[in-house]
Amino acid sequence: SSRAAECDIPGLPCPRERLRRQLDTLIGLSVRRGGFRAWEYYFDFGGGRAPWISGMAQATGIQSLAFALKLGFLRDRHRTYSRFAYRSLGAYRRHAPIGVRTRGYRGGVHYLQYSFAPRLYIINAFLQTLVGLYDFGKIGRSETATRRFRQADPEARRELPDYDTGSWTRYSRGGAESKFVYHVFTTKFALRLCRRTKARAYCKYGRRFAEYLERRGGPRLSRAPAR
């Protein structure tokens, strides 16, 4: 049956119709916000009032649609996924609180975890946002996604050292040490950016954060290239 069929990615079992429905549901959950498509949150949180959006969640949704473009059995939906992902990029053009764009504390462009908190800088969310934008830029051949990535990439590289305590990571700028799971996230996202861009800052700190994790008995994450 189609549920038991293999995807076009070697070695990846994939229930095709279920995946198609999930992607269509992902699109259906979005709303129009400030001239772009967005996935809104409808509960108050951390001093913010609903509805609000997350730069990380937005980019991960876009990234999911980008990966779907690699699957041949979804070819009939590729145009829909690509157009929708493109329409979601406006979140990175519009400033908070409508979008997630703000001025970073190092002077460049920063993308926020919470649209209602323009001065709360959370490194794991910022890095994953860049991963999602990079992937759609490459897979979807989106010049706009690549431009949004490049606009914020220098700020992320300048900020990254500030989250290194010498033995762990900070969750947010000037904040306490990350909880274990957020340290893992920051490490993984830095290493993913290292593999994609080969940028020195991502490689250096991704490896360093992985070493901190191992010292505390955490999992041994895949190491980045030497650079």
Image (spheres, rainbow, N blue to C red):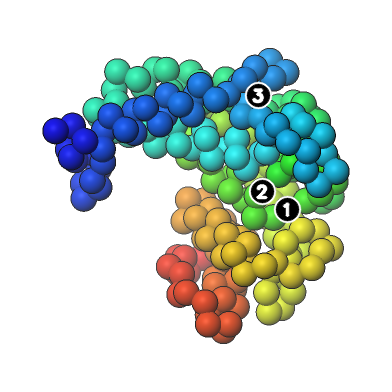
Check disc 1: other Cα within 10 Å, few if <14, some if 14-19, many if 20+.
many
Q: Is residue 194 left or right of residue 171?
A: left
Q: CA distance from mark 3 to mark 1?
A: 21 Å
Q: Earlier in the sequence, mark 3 or mark 2?
A: 3
Which amino acid, mark 3? Gly
Instruction: Identify the residue at image location x=57%, y=20%.
Output: 87
Residue placed most toward the observer, 194 or 19:
19
Q: Is residue 167 left or right of residue 28?
A: right
Q: CA distance from mark 1 to mark 2?
A: 6 Å
Horizontal and vertical percent for residue 92? 68, 31
Residue placed most toward the observer, 34 or 144:
34
Question: Residue 29 falls in which quadrant of the image?
Answer: top right
Q: Earlier in the sequence, mark 3 or mark 1?
A: 3
Residue matched to label 3:
90
Instruction: Identify the residue at image location x=51%, y=21%.
Output: 28
> Under tag 2, what secondary structure?
helix
